[in-house]
Amino acid sequence: MDVAQKIVISLMEKGILIEPSALDFIKKHGVKLEDIDINDLAKSGFLTKKHLESIIKKRNKEKNEVVVIRKSKKHLSADYESNFEIKNNFVNKDLPKNTETMAKLFNDRYEKIKNILLQRVELKNSISINKLENNKVNGEISIIGMVYNKIKSKNGNILLEVEDPTGKITVFVKDQKNIDYLITDEVIGLRGTYSNGMFFAEKIIFPDVPMPIGNIKQASDPLCAVFISDLHFGSKDFISDVEKKFIKWINDAEDKLASRVKYLFIAGDIVDGVGIYPEQENDLTVKDIYRQYELFEKFIEKIPEFIEIFVCPGNHDAVTLAEPQPPLSRDLVPNIKDFKNVHLVTNPAYVTVHGIKVLMYHGYSFTNLTDAILAIRKYGVKNPQYVMMEVLKKRHLAPLYGATIQTPDEKDHLVIDDVPDIFHTGDLHSHAVANYKGITLISSSTFQGQTSFMDRVGHIADPGKVTVVDLKSREWEVLQFYKNNN
């Protein structure tokens, strides 16, 4: 018998009835029998939701907690209807993990990015590799292929081995500077000449995102979206002061920015997890995964209900590590699973709000990509905007095989075939906001301080920074909720 049933039976024995909305309130907010003053109900003989709300306020005040009302008509955003669409939610087909399935995935990647490249004027008349030998066209020709290997020649130049479904060829790239941006498994276009079994490339053409035509996309309503990530509930290094300040701010109807918040995006690593790395238990205050998610539920309960919340998982969450990752299981968050404003989405996922398309991706591949791409290694993980730009240029969230574990599938769901207006990531615990060809790049900060595990993987925490984007003007503001006393 659960707590709610015990309360109902105890009240009925005293001749006190309970309205249905009050029963739902008890289940959501964990009201206990000892919280209810039965003598106070004797006159009316009826327990209402309003009475329970007063109990919760009193209990929170006694604990010196912030009293939060989830609904407030004082916020400007509460007067606007929600307008959103969730797309590209991945459904795991549980296909066999074999070479045939992975070959289909890479073929799909090649075909999708090839179609993107074919939109480039200089690649319109591309030919397949097996037709190079018999090509009758004089002058420059172009091919589209996947980088199979990078080889260092005797004189120090880098040669490429490039393949398509018809064959493989060795490529000499005249501009060796561009070589530093190339990694294996990415799909590129090459324009140059063919001679004696070798392709001499004058130019490397990346699929990249197009330059915007006209003005950047803007919403018509004066609303804002908030972007956060890497909360890490349950960690010893979780910064509770950041959480408290964030909750206080987002509930402040007098704050001109908070009053316009209609959407909240959370890009993974909701909890610190269990067994993520060796001896992690030494770094946890909460060692039960379900209790970690309970802390997250309490966090969500303090956010006004007119704010739509989109949550994707990360590598610390209790889902498969392979990407695309499915949404968080509703069993992990039983207390908020029925909240109409909470939306559990995949990683990655596209969410369109008031016409603004947001690509959410936790960013687990970014550390390995930064190490692999020589040209951006110098910026490091402290400057995540550069690796974000690079994946947009390559039109793939994990172009290097092994940068992340990828779910075997007939389709490659990590190809960026739909150009976003906002690209939101996390994982690195660094913070950055930038613009690339009209796309707002947001690498979210964290609610966690520097940990020994982060020291080992080379991440440096920049906690407490929250990015707010004005959807109407597309301008952004960064709020700082962490005060470093060192």
Image (spheres, rainbow, N blue to C red):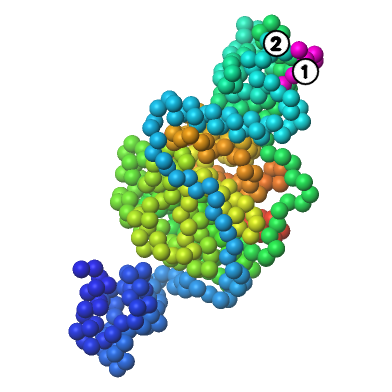
Q: Residue 138 in magenta?
A: yes
Specify the quadrant that holds the N terminus: bottom left
Residue corresponding to mark 1: 140
Between 176 and 406, which is closer to the camera in this rendering? 406
Where residue 33 sits in the image (x, y, percent)? 25, 76
Distance between mark 1 and mark 2 Cα atoms: 14 Å
In which image quadrant can residue 301 be found?
bottom left
Q: Residue at x 68, y 14 (%)?
A: 132
Q: Nearer the viewer, mark 1 or mark 2?
A: 2
* Residue 35 percent coordinates (x, y): 29, 77
Q: Is residue 465 above or below residue 51?
A: above
Residue at image location 36% in from the left, 63% down from the top: 335
Label 2 secondary element:
loop
| Circle number at residue 13 | none
Figure quadrant of residue 469: bottom right
Residue 417, horizontal then vertical, whole percent: 61, 40
* Amino acid carrying mark 1 in the image: Glu
> Looking at the image, which residue is at 72% across and 13% down?
135
Under tag 1, what secondary structure? loop
Q: Which residue is mark 2?
A: 134
Label 2 CA crowd tier, 10 Å (few <14, some 14–19, many 20+)? few
Residue that extends furthest to the bottom in the rendered view of this protein: 43
Direction from residue 189 to residue 347 in the image, left or right: left
- 439 relative position to 51: left or right: right
User: Residue flagged by tag 2: what amino acid is it?
Assistant: Asn
Mark 1 residue crowding within 10 angstroms, few (<14) / some (14–19) / many (20+): few
Magenta part of the protein: which range?
136-142
- Rendered residue at 36%/38% (across/down): 277
